[in-house]
Amino acid sequence: MKLKKGENVVVIAGKDRGQTGKIAQVFPQRSQVVVEGINLRKRRERPKKAGEKGQIVSVAFPLDSSKVMIKCDRCGRGVRVGYRVTEAKKIKICRRCQQPI
């Protein structure tokens, strides 16, 4: 999986198609990612202290990694990713404009 925590991605399929966000969590074994503000669902939260009320909270649920693409800052859209090895460093590059991501 070529996705890492903290990268900006574009959703390419599903109800949130076209929206962008930052990856908050990655689950490589399940091939899923959690993107901030995307794929939100309502969860009921119980009161933690006496006298406190329960509430309904929006939580970001995992998306399949095939539904997101890394966003290139220069191109401004979702792109495929390649790698270039320079000076014993592996750098992610945009396949469209060949610039580092």
Image: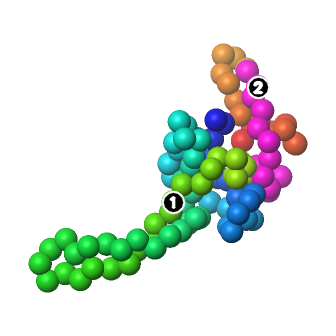
Mark 1 Cα-neighbour bin, 10 Å: few <14, some 14–19, many ≥20 = some
Q: Secondary structure at mark 2?
A: strand
Q: For the view shown, which residue lies furthest in the right direction? A: 96
Q: In the image, what residue occupies the spot 26% across and 73% down?
A: 46
Residue 74 drawn at (x, y percent): 80, 51
Of residues 25 and 39, the one drawn nearer to the viewer in this rendering:
39
Q: Label 1 belongs to which residue? A: 61
- The quadrant of the image that shows the C terminus is top right
Magenta stretch encompasses residue 53 = no
Q: Label 2 belongs to which residue? A: 84
Of residues 79 and 53, the one drawn nearer to the viewer in this rendering:
53
Q: In the image, what residue occupies the spot 14% across and 83% down?
A: 51
Q: For the view shown, which residue lies furthest in the left direction? A: 50
CA–CA distance in space, label 1 to label 2? 33 Å
- Quadrant in the picture for residue 57: bottom left
Mark 2 residue type? Arg
| Chain part drawn in magenta | 72-85
Residue 2 drawn at (x, y percent): 66, 36
**Looking at the image, is mark 1 or mark 2 nearer the viewer?**
1
Residue 75 drawn at (x, y percent): 83, 52
Of residues 53 and 94, the one drawn nearer to the viewer in this rendering:
53
Mark 1 residue type? Phe
Residue 10 drawn at (x, y percent): 71, 57
Q: Secondary structure at mark 1?
A: loop
Above-or-below relation of 98 to 65: above
